Image (cartoon, rainbow, N blue to C red):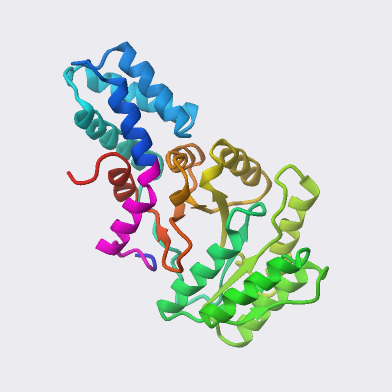
Amino acid sequence: MGLFDFFSKEKKDTLDKGLLKTKETVFSKITRAIAGKSKIDDEVLDNLEEILITSDVGVETTLNIIKRIEKRAASDKYVNAQELNSILREEIAVLLTENNSDDAEGFYVPTTEKPYVIMVVGVNGVGKTTTIGKLAYQFKKAGKSVYLGAADTFRAAAVEQLVVWGERVGVPVIKQKMGADPASVAYDAVSSAIANNADVVIIDTAGRLHNKVGLMNELTKIKNVMKKVAINAPNEVLLVLDGSTGQNAFEQAKQFTLATEVTAMAITKLDGTAKGGVVIGISDQFKIPVKYIGLGEGIEDLQVFQKKEFVDSLFGGDK
């Protein structure tokens, strides 16, 4: 089991509230799509395809879902809005299970290997530093000692924001002067964590524009320098994406997975958008675990992504 993966009623309520805009939009569109219909026909399927694509599920994933619905339609001919939501919920849950065999769990930190190093990547503005702060809070709450590394040395605001989070959570932040070599900061952070027997190190990196290959190469340099003091570092490369950007999040995921070895994803800002379907498409298309979703500004509003609970919240709640 991973850390922080217990799904409480409070977390379910937060998930329901965070996905409300997406749910209301999808529900209203589905209701209109089947108005006056008594069975799933070509028109319903065409409308459903459009609904899923405009909810940023993605074309490939949408077509896969439609094929599954077509098969169900052969036996489940009569349908209303509630029944269609139930079918969608079931088929999407199965699809996600097939492509990502188990529910993602929070990062597992082994007691035999210290420190566990997480390098966090993503473009500016996606909520990367905030995600780091919330992760640090959850690790500390779980009894782990945490160090943060401010390797985004190109923006004073990025370092300052990480320092604020460090003070808020009560964990040390390793930093250098502005313009310093980011790999040097990462090296210092891992070295300090080793010297103090810390459990976890989370490294913030610059919000690199995903179309600049030279800047991406620097991520490789950071990784290689950290390996000089911790052979398995980084243990995880977490890509943070802004769910509210819809298809742009797909493009960022594509470019980052080509440029560096991403092992996990966190999708943020789902509470302020009707584009929550992007989680389904990204989880399906990239076969990289979406481990966390951001559902608000609060320190507790970063949740482990649980597929069943997510789909239930999105397509009709209790069953």
Q: Quadrant of residue 22?
A: top left
Image location of residue 208, percent across then percent down: 72, 52
Residue 59 among those drawn in magenta: no
Q: Is residue 47 above or below residue 150?
A: above
Tell me the residue at 71%/67% (across/down): 157
Tell me the residue at 48%/42% (across/down): 287
Q: Is residue 107 above or below residue 111?
A: above
- Is the magenta region chiefly helix, strand or loop? helix
Q: Is residue 289 visible?
A: no
Front-lying residue, 100 or 112: 100
Q: Is residue 179 above or below residue 175?
A: above
Boundaries of the magenta span? 4-21
Q: Is residue 90 visible?
A: yes
Q: Is residue 301 left or right of residue 91?
A: right
Q: Is residue 36 left or right of residue 227?
A: left
User: If the image is split into quadrants, where does the N terminus sit?
Assistant: bottom left
Front-lying residue, 23 or 133: 23
Tell me the residue at 71%/57% (across/down): 219
Image location of residue 317, percent across then percent down: 24, 45
